[in-house]
Amino acid sequence: LDALTLDSPDDQIRAGAAKLTNALRVGDLEHAVEPGSLVLLALDKAVNTLIITSFLHVLSNASSAAGRYAQSLELAAQLLSVGSEHRLDFVRPFGVIDRAIGHLGIRSFADANHDIELTTTLVPGDVHIQGNLSALRCRLLLATGRPSLAADAAKQGFLAGIPPVPLQ
């Protein structure tokens, strides 16, 4: 990625998102989040809102994973704002999940629970999102001192009988 020619702000943002995604998968988040945050300076000059929202989502994720929950919450708010402004409805569940994770990190459990429940209603048939929400519910139960309920919740299936993609 470092050898790529980055001719436009969109190219810089796309490359930043790729580096952050790699860091989330292989580690070294602390060294990736700081340069990723510097890419935010290019957002005002970017054109492609899909690239912008993708970057905001992955930087919010990386920020949470690095323990930078306040930053993650700001990025989630920005992601939701850009998605709403450009009528990218599919962005909303991801932004609300990012916000829920940030709320968990700052121990704002009622807000995290609200976001989890809200997202459940936004995309009830999405296996990927529902799986993330199940994991978040378990994390919330653990964080609030209810390990036996978290263990029970982890045993429960979700969306039984619904295929991962629509069959047509």
Image (tube, rainbow, N blue to C red):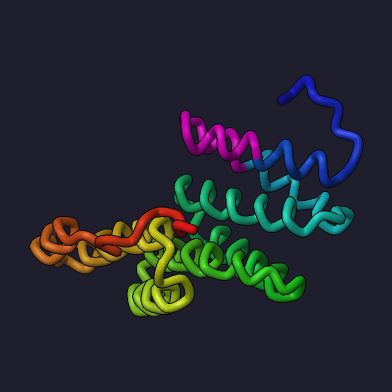
30 within the magenta span: yes
Give the residue drawn at x 37%, y 63%: 130
In this rendering, would 137 be left or right of 61? left
Give the residue drawn at x 85%, y 58%: 44
Q: Residue furthest top?
A: 3
In this rendering, would 62 be left or right of 155? right
Q: Nearer the viewer, residue 27 or 137?
A: 137
Q: Nearer the viewer, residue 95 or 103?
A: 95
Residue 166's x, y, as percent? 46, 59
In this rendering, would 103 be left or right of 59? left
Residue 18's x, y, as percent? 65, 36
Residue 40's x, y, as percent? 75, 52
Q: Is residue 112 above or below residue 36?
A: below
Q: Which residues are magenta?
A: 18-33
**The N terminus sits in image quarter:** top right
Task: Residue 121: name its quadrant.
Answer: bottom left
